[in-house]
Amino acid sequence: MQIAQLLRHKGPDVATIAPDRSVRDALAVLAERGVGALVVSAGGDAVDGIVSERDVVRALHASGPGVLDGPVSALMTVDVRTCVPGASVHDLARTMTDHRVRHVPVVEDGRLLGIVSIGDVVKARLDELEEERAHLVDYIQA
């Protein structure tokens, strides 16, 4: 399965935040949207960085509650792993595992098209395995 297929099922909605917004604002968006990461984007259509719950927790531990009033850009990850719509779910799973990332923006020609989480990848792989199992059962029973 390709990432483009996964996005068709999931939808293209991506939670974003501007880099100059506060970490407190980012936490509010994370909670409101029920997501674990936000794509940091000045214009909403390109990836400037990514900030996750994990980034906030680590910053709070290291620097205390003062980080909440600072800008998202101070703790966002700038070197963001991205993928293209034509990438396979299997390859993305490998990338996520190798680089220990849970959220990967989908980008084509510099434009943000969606985001894929590790949960999306696991669900897609389980769906593929279930489909293969069903085909094998049909083959055996035929």
Image (tube, rainbow, N blue to C red):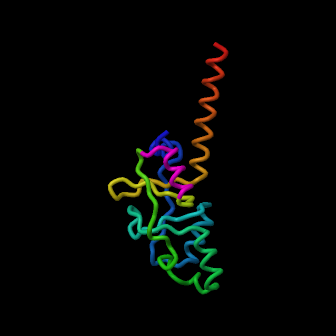
Q: Position of residue 93 (x, y in %)?
A: 54, 49
Viewport quadrant of the C terminus: top right
Q: Characterize the magenta stretch by its predominant secondary structure.
A: helix
Q: Quadrant of residue 55?
A: bottom right
Q: Position of residue 38 (x, y in %)?
A: 52, 65
Picture mark count: 0
Q: Residue at x 57, y 42 (%)?
A: 124
The answer to whether residue 119 is magenta is no
Q: Residue at x 38, y 67 (%)?
A: 43
Q: Is residue 93 above or below residue 74?
A: above
Q: Position of residue 25 (x, y in %)?
A: 55, 75
Q: Is residue 58 above or below residue 5?
A: below
Q: Is residue 16 above or below residue 137?
A: below
Left or right: 93, with 133 as reference point:
left
Residue extent of the magenta highlight: 87-98
Q: Residue at x 56, y 84 (%)?
A: 69
Q: Position of residue 34 (x, y in %)?
A: 62, 60
In the displayed orientation, state which residue is furthest to the top.
142
In the displayed orientation, state which residue is furthest to the front.
98
The answer to whether residue 93 is magenta is yes
Q: Is residue 46 above or below residue 56?
A: above
